[in-house]
Image (spheres, coloured by chain):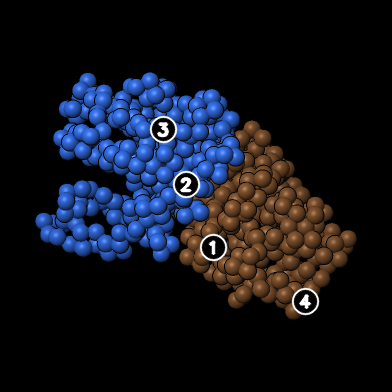
Chain colours: A brown, B blue
Amino acid sequence: MIVVKAGGNGNLDMEAICADVARLVEQGEQVVLVHGGSNETNVISEKLGHPPRFVTSVSGYVSRYTDRETLEIFAMVTAGRINKLLVERLQQLGVNAVGLSGLDGRLLEGKRKSSLRVIEDGKQKILRGEYSGVIQWVNAGLLKTLLEAGYTPVVAPLAISHESEALNVDGDRAAAAIGSALKAEKMIILSNVPGLLRDFPDESTLIPHIPPEQAEEYLERYAQGRMKRKILGAVEALHDGVRQVIIADGRTAQPLRRALAGQGTVIQ
Amino acid sequence: MIVVKAGGNGNLDMEAICADVARLVEQGEQVVLVHGGSNETNVISEKLGHPPRFVTSVSGYVSRYTDRETLEIFAMVTAGRINKLLVERLQQLGVNAVGLSGLDGRLLEGKRKSSLRVIEDGKQKILRGEYSGVIQWVNAGLLKTLLEAGYTPVVAPLAISHESEALNVDGDRAAAAIGSALKAEKMIILSNVPGLLRDFPDESTLIPHIPPEQAEEYLERYAQGRMKRKILGAVEALHDGVRQVIIADGRTAQPLRRALAGQGTVIQ
C-alpha cells in the first residue's frame, strides 16, 4: 500500500501524477491519493470577495487564518473542485476513484484550534473563530472497506472536530496520519522541489537519504517553510509504522516511478 | 430503505430535513439523501464572473446550458459546498454521513448530451459543448457497501459519462435512479410546494393520491415546470421497483415525518 500526497501549491504535474497512480493501480498496488488546495482556494477566495488572510504565529510560522467563510470556500474548492476533477481524470485512466473529505464517515477526526496567537504590527494578538485543527484519529475502516472493494480513495484535506465542525487541515499531515493508520509500506510526498535540500533553493544539494533517528535533526537544520511540515509528517508516519517516506519532485514526468526508484529524499 | 431528495432551489428547511433524517437513522432506517444545487450554483457562478445561461429547448423546456466552466462550478458548489455542509450537519446530529457525487466509484453513470437544440430569438440553434446527461446505470454495490457498514450516503447530482466525463444531472432523476437501483421501499421528493397541485399555485388544490397507472396522465394534465421532472422521476422509480413515491413539502417542520404520514402527493 502506498499513500501519495500531491498538490496544494500549483505547479505539480497532476497529469503525470494521475498517470503514475493509474499504472500502480493497474499493477495491483493499493493507493490512497491525498491532495491539497491552498493555491486554488486563494484564487477563488479573491474572486468571491473574501481574500485569504495570512498571519504569523508567535513561534514564527506563517499560516492561513481560516474563519468560517474561508473554511466553507476551502471545503468547496478542495472537496468539490480539486477532488472531483482528480476523480474524473483518474476514472478516465481506468482507476475506480472515490473522492472523500475528512468529514465523510469522520475519516479524519481531530481537535479544533479555535484561536491563533499571532504577531501583528509587532504586537501579540489573539485571533478567534479559527477553523483548523490537528488530526488525532483516522477511520481506517472506511478506507480499507473501499480499498478491498477495488476503489482508490482520493482524500481532500478537511477534518471533522470532536464536536463535528469542519476543519482545514494540512495535507502533508493528513497523508501522514492516513499512512500511519493504514500501516502503509510507503508514503510519497510530492513537492515543487526534488526533496530536502542542504542549501535551499540549490537543487544540486539534494539530501538523498535521512536515517529516521536523525530526521528531527535534519528538520531543524535544513527544512524551510512548508518543507518543515513534510519532514514533520514523515517523522510521525515512520514513528507510527510506515516503512519508508520519500519526498520527491512532483513537477517531472513519471514522478511516482522516479520516487519509487529512490529519486528524492528517502527517509528510512 | 428510504431515498430522500431535497434541495436545489433555495427555500427548503434543510435543518428540519437533516433532523428528520437523523431521527429515521436513529430508528434503524437506511436512508440515502440526494440533494440539488441549482440555486447556489447560480449565485456563485455570478460572483465568479460566469453567470448562468438558461436556454429554451425546441420542445419548450427551460434548462441550464452547462458548458465546461459551468460544469466545474456546478461540481464545486454541489459536491464541495452543499454536500460537505450537509455531511457536517448530519454528523452533528449523530448520523455517520458519507458524501459522494455520481463521479465517485462511477456511482451514477450515463449518456452525455453534448449538444442542445434550442430556440433563440425565434430561431432554432444548436449549442455544442454541453455537459449534462441522463443516468443509465447506478453503482448500487457502492451504496450497499456503505449502508451495510452503517454509513448514510449523501449524493450530489453529478454523473459520469461512459467516456468518463463529469456531467450535470437532474437531482430528482438521480434520486429516482438510486431508488430504483436499491429497490427502495419509499422515495420522498421534498419540494417548495405541498405536492402536485390541481390548480397551480393554489395549495388548497393538492392532489393527495395518484394511482401509478395514471401518473403519466396527471403529469401531462397538472405538472408545471420542475414538477414535471419530479413526476417523471416518480414514474420511472415505481416502474423499476420502488413501492411508494411521496412528493411533499420541504419547507415545513418535520417534513419527512409528515411525508411518511401521507401528507403530500402519494403515488402508489
B194 relative to A224, above or below = above
Question: Dot 3 falls on which chain?
Answer: B
Q: Which residue is mark 2?
A: B140
Q: Which is nearer the eye, A175 or A39?
A: A175
Spot the residue most to the bottom. Answer: A204
In the image, B168: left or right of A255?
left
**Residue A245: % across, % down:** 76, 63
Local crowd size for mark 4, using a 10 Å CA cut-off: few (<14), some (14–19), many (≥20): some
A160 relative to B17, above or below = below
Q: Nearer the viewer, mark 2 or mark 4?
A: 2
Instruction: Tell me the kind of residue under disc 4.
Output: Thr
**Residue A57: % across, % down:** 71, 48
A72 relative to B106, above or below = above
Question: Dot 1 falls on which chain?
Answer: A
Q: Which residue is mark 4?
A: A205
Count the marks. Answer: 4
Callouts 2 and 1 on one subunit? no
Instruction: Tell me the kind of residue under disc 1.
Output: Val
Question: Dot 4 falls on which chain?
Answer: A
Local crowd size for mark 3, using a 10 Å CA cut-off: few (<14), some (14–19), many (≥20): some
Callouts 4 and 3 on one subunit? no
Instruction: Say whether disc 4 or disc 1 marks the residue closer to the N-terminus.
Output: 1
Q: Which residue is mark 1?
A: A95
Q: Which residue is mark 3?
A: B185
